[in-house]
Image (cartoon, coloured by chain):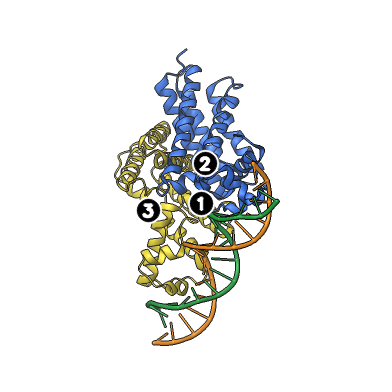
Chain colours: A yellow, B blue, C orange, D green
DNA sequence: GTCTATATCTCGATAGAC
DNA sequence: GTCTATCGAGATATAGAC
């Protein structure tokens, strides 16, 4: 069930995960920032921190899957859409004081080798993004294997650029990665 | 000073950071795995966990900076070197049971917005890698601005591919990212 | 320099009143 | 469903014997 309290816990946790990851975020900090009594968290998430984290990863992942079509739709061609995607990501990152990058990357690296249920949640999100991107680019005229390659390449370049940008407080990695991906799109002939 | 005990602590901590990051690694776990008494850690690192982490980040970063020339030197051309770089990274990652990817990426994301001294340490490492890669590629015949662009693009693609590969237990992201970067190298004409 | 014991704090989680 | 009090275990860090 989606009560207001439950949603507030999910949103607050997602925000804290983007900023400081899974291990860096305590249950106490979550309930404090969500202005929620302690017991409510365990009422809504009986599985504790692991269940809460898995739900946060999946819901945040589903939200962010909508960004690709939202940015690419108005673009005249895919190369322009790709460049715009990285530009907007950088703009948002800088405005958030180098805080708001990928909702699941930090968690994904933290848990990949030590928490199997959470690792699967992050894998499912990446698979969702790849499937959604592949379908979208296919519908815009790319052959399906090419669409898949470009989607994965774009996600890799974006995730890596986020790391360097946050560490160095600089937009340069996002600009360069955006150019690199955009060039790949420009080099692929549309099927239509 | 570089005593054996001190080095063992540094190496063990680096290993644990690659596997589970900064917040996921406890002091107790470090001294247990390094077979070192508890007090020795605070004798060699009076600044505690933060000082130890900063030293681990910088020394591991300096070690990994040597990998690029080691892989690119035997390659007949830069595009081949880039492809080989990603191939070897993937081979090592899979052999380590999806554990051994980037020595500082997890830490970099964890601390970027919450621990300024450590954030600066990760920034310094990325800057070192960029400077070393730019110089190497310049010496192999690329114009310096091009060398810098390609170095940053390669690091971004590699870091992002590591995230997807570890989360999905798959080499596909590394293969695709390697192809993408290699194509960029092939597209740049050497200056010599 | 090495090692043990321990202080202090915060963690995730539970119990139970309301 | 909401909220408080508290548990036991773990964390980082310190004190001091050797």
What residue sits 44% from the left and 51% below the top? A132
The image position of residue B52, as x and y in percent, is 54, 43
What residue sits 47% from the left and 65% below the top? A52
The image position of residue C16, as x and y in percent, is 49, 85
What is the chain identity of the residue bearing mark 2?
B
Which label belongs to residue A190?
Answer: none
| Label 1 sits on residue | A108
Task: Report if the CB atoms under discs 1 and 3 are less than 8 Å apart.
Answer: no
**Which mark is in front, 3 or 2?**
2
Q: Which of B84 and B29 is in front in this view?
A: B29
**Which mark is in front, 1 or 3?**
1
Above or below, B87 relative to A92? above
Q: Residues within 10 Å of mark 1 (few under 14, many from 20)?
A: many
Label 2 sits on a secondary structure element that is loop
Q: Which residue reaches farthest top?
A: B192
| Label 2 sits on residue | B104
Q: Distance between the residues labelled 1 and 2?
A: 14 Å
Q: Do labels 3 and 2 share a chain?
A: no
Above or below, A165 relative to A35? above
Quarter holding the C terminus of chain A? top left
Quarter holding the N terminus of chain A? bottom left
| Label 3 sits on residue | A66
Q: Do labels 1 and 3 share a chain?
A: yes
| Mark 1 or mark 3, earlier in chain | 3
**Which mark is in front, 1 or 2?**
2
Label 3 sits on a secondary structure element that is loop
The image position of residue B132, as x and y in percent, is 49, 26
- Which image quarter: residue B44? top right
Q: Which of A55 and C10 is in front in this view?
A: C10
């Amino acid at each position: 069930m989606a009560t207001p309290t439950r949603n507030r816990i999910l949103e607050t946790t997602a925000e804290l995960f983007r900023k400081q990851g899974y291990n860096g975020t305590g249950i106490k900090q979550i309930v404090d920032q969500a202005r929620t009594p302690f017991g409510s968290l365990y009422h809504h998430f009986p599985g504790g921190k692991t269940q809460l984290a898995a739900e946060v990863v999946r819901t945040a992942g589903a939200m962010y899957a909508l960004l690709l079509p939202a940015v690419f739709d108005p673009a005249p061609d895919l190369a322009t859409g790709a460049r715009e995607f990285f530009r907007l990501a950088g703009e948002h990152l800088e405005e958030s004081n180098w805080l708001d990058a990928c909702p699941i990357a930090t968690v994904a690296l933290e848990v990949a080798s030590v928490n199997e249920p959470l690792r699967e949640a992050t894998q499912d999100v990446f698979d969702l993004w790849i499937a959604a991107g592949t379908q979208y680019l296919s519908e815009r005229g790319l052959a399906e294997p090419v669409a898949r390659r470009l989607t994965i390449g774009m996600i890799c370049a974006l995730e890596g650029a986020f790391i360097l940008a946050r560490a160095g407080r600089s937009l340069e990695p996002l600009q360069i990665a955006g150019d690199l991906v955009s060039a790949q799109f420009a080099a692929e002939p549309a099927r239509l």
